[in-house]
Image (cartoon, rainbow, N blue to C red):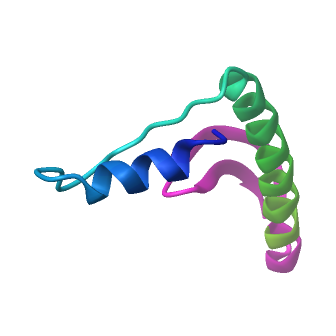
Amino acid sequence: MKIYSKLTNELMDSNNVEDIESYFDFSKKDEIEVELIKEASKKAKQKAKNMALGLGVKINSVFALDHIAKCTLMLADINY
């Protein structure tokens, strides 16, 4: 990583090089993703509770979860 910028700059300055793409991954990506999903799910659960409270209903159970464009949706069975 120390020489990455220098190397890519030199390559881009070379003849016949039009584009450079790089991909970096993290060895603990899956582990971190699990923790982030847990955290996001807890926040989504609290948000759903707050929304239900505002509607004057209570969530009995969650029957579906959907992850769309960085947003977790909870579909729940509610009591009126």
Direction from residue 56 to residue 6 in the image, left or right: left
Residue segment shown in magenta: 52-80
Look at the image and say whether residue 12 sits in the magenta stretch.
no
Q: Residue sitting at 77 percent across and 55 percent down? A: 44
Q: Position of residue 59 (x, y in %)?
A: 81, 52
- Quarter-of-image position of residue 47: bottom right
- Quarter-of-image position of residue 1: top right
Q: Residue sitting at 53 percent across and 35 percent down? A: 24
- Quarter-of-image position of residue 73: bottom right
Residue 39, placed above or below residue 56:
above
Q: Is residue 57 among the parts visible in the rendering?
A: no
The residue nearer to you, when weighing 16 against 76, is 16
Q: Please state, as top left, top right, bottom left or bottom right, where the C terminus lies in the image.
A: bottom right
Q: Position of residue 39 (x, y in %)?
A: 84, 45
Residue 12, placed above or below residue 36:
below
The residue nearer to you, when weighing 62 against 13, is 13
Residue 74, placed above or below residue 52:
above
Direction from residue 11 to residue 77 in the image, left or right: right
Q: Main secondary structure of the magenta part?
A: strand
Q: How many marks?
A: 0
Give the residue furthest to the bottom: 54
Q: Residue sitting at 32 percent across and 48 percent down? A: 11
Look at the image and say whether residue 73 sits in the magenta stretch.
yes
